[in-house]
Image: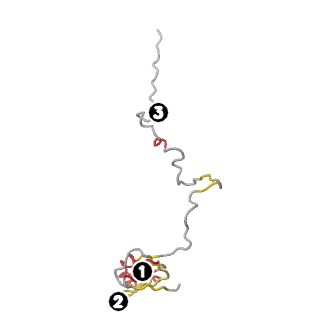
Amino acid sequence: MVKRRKKKKKSGSYGKGSSKKGRGAGSRGGRGAAGQGKKGMQKKMTKDGIHELGEKGFSSQTEQNGINLRDIDQRIESFVEQGLAEETDSGYVFHADEAGYEKILGSGKLTKEIEVHAEKFSSTAEKKIEEAGGEAVKVEE
């Protein structure tokens, strides 16, 4: 009598457990060129040749050191203590150049009357300073 070996049945799961788990694009990392995104040394061919990711975009011509009105309003007492601002009868006088700031930015609002001396002002900052009863004084560099 000849012994027959039993034929091993195929699981259909390829080592992924249930046969339903290995379906779909998610199990292989997406479709097509998905997942090639911004990684180190990534290159992409264009009609002009090789395009390195990260070449496009804006670059600042000159770096400016600015401060928002919100920060001036919140920290004016500490600026007075440090000698970077003065307290007057009508309000405060803030010297941005002495504090190390070139430009006054318009984010936030002023709750006190502050006369601000700086090289540059954004248009919204000038409006908000004057609306609060202060004055925007441009200082020559």
Read off the residue under disc 1. 127
Identify the residue at the far right of this view.
48
Residue 14 position, x and y percent, is 47, 33
> Is residue 58 rendered to the left or right of residue 110?
right
Amino acid of disc 2: Ser
Tell me the residue at 53%/73% (across/down). 63
Amino acid of disc 3: Tyr
Read off the residue under disc 2. 90
- Which of 4/125 is in front? 125
What mark, if any, has residue 85 been given in the picture?
Answer: none
- Which of 110/11 is in front? 110
- Whichever of labels 3 and 2 marks the residue nearer the N terminus, that label is 3
Residue 71 position, x and y percent, is 39, 76
Read off the residue under disc 3. 14
In the rendered view, tell whether residue 43 sits above or below residue 109: above
- Whichever of labels 3 and 1 marks the residue nearer the N terminus, that label is 3
Tell me the residue at 55%/54% (across/down). 40
- Whichever of labels 1 and 2 marks the residue nearer the N terminus, that label is 2
Element assignment for label 1: helix
In the rendered view, tell whether residue 8 sits above or below residue 61: above
Amino acid of disc 1: Lys
Cβ atoms under marks 1 and 2 closer than 8 Å: no
Report how far apart the C-alphas of labels 1 and 2 lie in the structure.
Answer: 19 Å
How many numbered badges does the structure rendering display?
3
Q: Which of the 4 image quadrants contains residue 129? A: bottom left
